Image (spheres, rainbow, N blue to C red):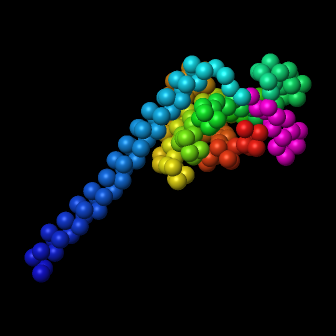
């Protein structure tokens, strides 16, 4: 039996490493499919410029989202109230496909653009975000991919110089901002208005 022990260990190692490689390969196939789906949504948005417009008009910690007829109506209120959270929402056949949020500080130190891509069943497929901040003079581009069950598949992060948009290393004075995760259309803060 001892003669076959090294062979048995080798076979066991190959089997477990092959299983983990298969899992990674499955993730990359799923991520590629999500990217293709997101490109279709991007094309839909470019062709159909009709979107619904929302903004959080609350002056305290309690969210109060309103829908606006057009961007100029929202911009007028923004000039008066300095809105820090706004969203554009695109739907097809009464199903939300994409929601593009803008989050920003009242001081203007940072702004984060976050595009949420939703599947036909309402589950989150992808988040594409870009944070631009003077804290470190950096832009952070992130892509987050999710399975239908809501499991994070992978995250791709790129740090860029704020002005040149060329790749840089993460800087010590960089202050990150959290991306809100809406796992489904039902979790959007203005879902009841959709």
Point out residue 15 in the picture as x, y percentages from the top left corner.
25, 62
Q: In which quarter of the image is the C terminus?
A: top right
Going by the image, does 7 lie left or right of 176?
Answer: left
Residue 85 showing in the rendered view: yes
Q: Nearer the viewer, residue 8 or 74?
A: 74
x, y percent for residue 168 = 52, 30
Which one is in front, 80 or 37? 37
Tell me the residue at 57%/19% (across/down): 47
Q: Where is residue 26 in the image (x, y as percent from the top left)?
A: 36, 48
Q: Tell me if residue 168 is in the magenta stretch.
A: no
Magenta range: 53-67
Image quarter (top left, top right, bottom left or bottom right) of the N terminus: bottom left
| Residue appearing at x 64%, y 20% in the figure | 49
Q: Give whichever of 88, 25 is nearer the camera.
A: 88
Instruction: Tell me the residue at 9%/76% (across/down).
Output: 3
Q: Which residue lies furthest to the front in this view?
A: 93
Residue at 76% x, 43% y is 192
Q: Left or right: 32 with respect to 115?
A: left
Task: Name the image quarter holding residue 8.
Answer: bottom left
Depth order, front residue of 166/19: 19
Query: Hey, which quadrant is residue 108 in on the image?
Result: top right
Tell me if residue 54 is in the magenta stretch: yes
Q: Is any part of residue 104 visible from this angle?
A: no
Image position of 84 (left or right of 5): right
Corner quadrant of residue 79: top right
Q: In this view, does 93 lie above or below 50?
A: below
- Residue 151 is situated, as x and y percent measured from the top left of the image, at 52, 53
From this view, report whether residue 170 is shown above or below residue 51.
below
């Amino acid at each position: 039996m001892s003669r076959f022990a090294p062979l048995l260990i080798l076979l066991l190692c190959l089997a477990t490493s092959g299983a983990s490689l298969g899992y990674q390969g499955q993730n990359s196939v799923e991520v590629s499919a999500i990217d293709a789906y997101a490109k279709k949504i991007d094309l839909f948005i470019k062709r159909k410029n009709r979107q619904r417009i929302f903004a959080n008009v609350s002056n305290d910690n309690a969210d109060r989202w309103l829908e606006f007829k057009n961007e100029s109506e929202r911009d007028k209120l923004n000039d008066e109230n300095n809105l820090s959270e706004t969203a554009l929402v695109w739907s097809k056949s009464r199903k939300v496909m994409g929601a593009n949020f803008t989050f920003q500080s009242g001081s203007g130190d940072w702004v984060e653009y976050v595009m949420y891509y939703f599947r036909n069943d309402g589950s989150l497929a992808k988040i594409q975000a870009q944070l631009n901040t003077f804290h470190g003079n950096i832009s952070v581009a992130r892509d987050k991919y999710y399975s239908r069950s809501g499991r994070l598949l992978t995250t791709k992060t790129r740090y860029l110089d704020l002005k040149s948009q060329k790749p840089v290393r993460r800087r010590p004075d960089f202050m990150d901002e959290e991306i809100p995760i809406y796992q489904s259309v039902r979790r959007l803060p203005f879902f009841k208005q959709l």
